[in-house]
Amino acid sequence: MPLDEDDAAILVNEEETFDDEEVTEGELANELDPVFDEDFVSVLWLYDSDGTPFSADGRRDYTSTWKVIVRNKDLGPVEVCKAPGLPAPFSPYVSPGGRFSDLAAVQVNAKARREHQDDWQSWIITLTYSTSVPEGGVPEGQVTQLPDILIGTQNQPWLEPPKIEWDEETTSEAPQFDLDMRRFRNSVGQPFTPAPTYPVRYPVLVITRNQKHFDGYTGQKYYNAVNSEFFMGHPPGTCQCIMARGTLEHRGVIPYYRCTYRVRIKTQTIPRLTLVADTDNAYTADLIDEFPVDRDVWQPLVLDEGLNEKGSIVRFEGLIPTPQDAVVPIVRNGHPVSQPYVLDGKGKSVQPGSDTIVWLRFRMFQERDLNLLLTSDNP
């Protein structure tokens, strides 16, 4: 997760030094976002230091600042700018955390400098994004990334910016609420049998891009994964990758993969909670900041309701009556109910007329940072 500038500034004490073992296992490696690489300890976003989101000529520019901690004192700016976790050259601008993105602005410049001249471990990387690129798009006949590898997108097809499309997906669903947040119930308050179904459309972002590598593990890693961070401005849990496909192609003798990812987005709302529940999987108020209660998500959210509730019964131990906890039928007007009643998240039924709604949250899909599909050269 991105840190505030003040927090990031105190992560490294310039007076401390570390040998290789200390950097790998010590406090510095634990405090920063670690990377699994023999040359690097961590890659950390510091802040977005500058930006021009509007100008009369249509040009938009952004500047993002990162800190890279290295293990190898022989690394220079070329190697540091290739640190795993840094956005790739010509990748579109995505703000840290994914709250904002400008897919027309691509990375056009990367600058590296040591944070302190007498400290070989800490580097500051400044990335510049712009909607202004050379006429004709990304250059093909000149150095476009780093001078120690083949030049041009003709020899590096993975440097080409991703192709972005918007599509839609239509499914048939039986919603529990209508647009006015009224539950689908008949005039006596019972659910319809069978439940009515309606077409529901979801916007789908289609990302087509070139990659150096793609295999079954990459597909498995992203297929059905939901966003762990904000993605295209949408909160965590509301975006799901429903396709991760790669096709091996060649540009001359250079192999690469042409990959397609489809991400569907939920924009529906669900009723806000009026009750805080104690159970581990209940949708509780302390999750509001990271798991918005008024947006539907792809992880299963099930209304807490049933025919039974937690209660007590009297058992006799010898001649002594002893109340014991038990699951008992919900009784209304002297009779067990025949239709599910809303529960309060603690196993007790809610009295008729209450507007209490409790969602139980279950985890069926893995969480991934889907922003890497836009910014990383090897997601």
Image (cartoon, rainbow, N blue to C red):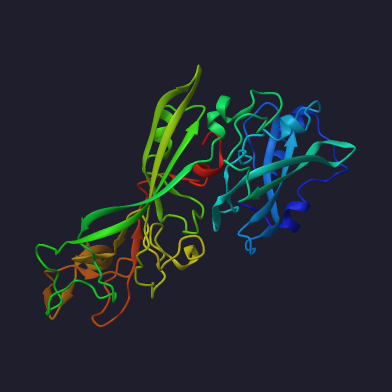
Q: Which image quadrant for residue 173?
A: bottom left
Identify whether 284 is placed above or below 362.
below
Query: Which percent across, then down, holds residue 204?
Result: 36, 51
Identify whether 5 is placed above or below 84.
below
**Front in this rendered view, residue 4 or 144:** 144
**Front in this rendered view, residue 297 or 123:** 123
Horizontally, is 341 left or right of 130 in the view? left
Identify whether 347 is placed above or below 3.
below
Horizontally, is 234 left or right of 30 in the view? left
**Front in this rendered view, residue 354 or 53:** 53
Query: Which percent across, then down, holds residue 344?
Result: 32, 70
Q: Is residue 365 visible?
A: yes
Horizontally, is 230 left or right of 174 in the view? right
The structure residue drawn at horizontal position 50% and vertical position 31%, both measured from the top left corner, is: 211
Identify whether 120 is placed above or below 97.
above
The structure residue drawn at horizontal position 73% and vertical position 33%, both measured from the top left corner, is: 80
Tell which residue pokes out farthest to the top in this image: 253
Q: Which image quadrant for residue 225?
A: top left
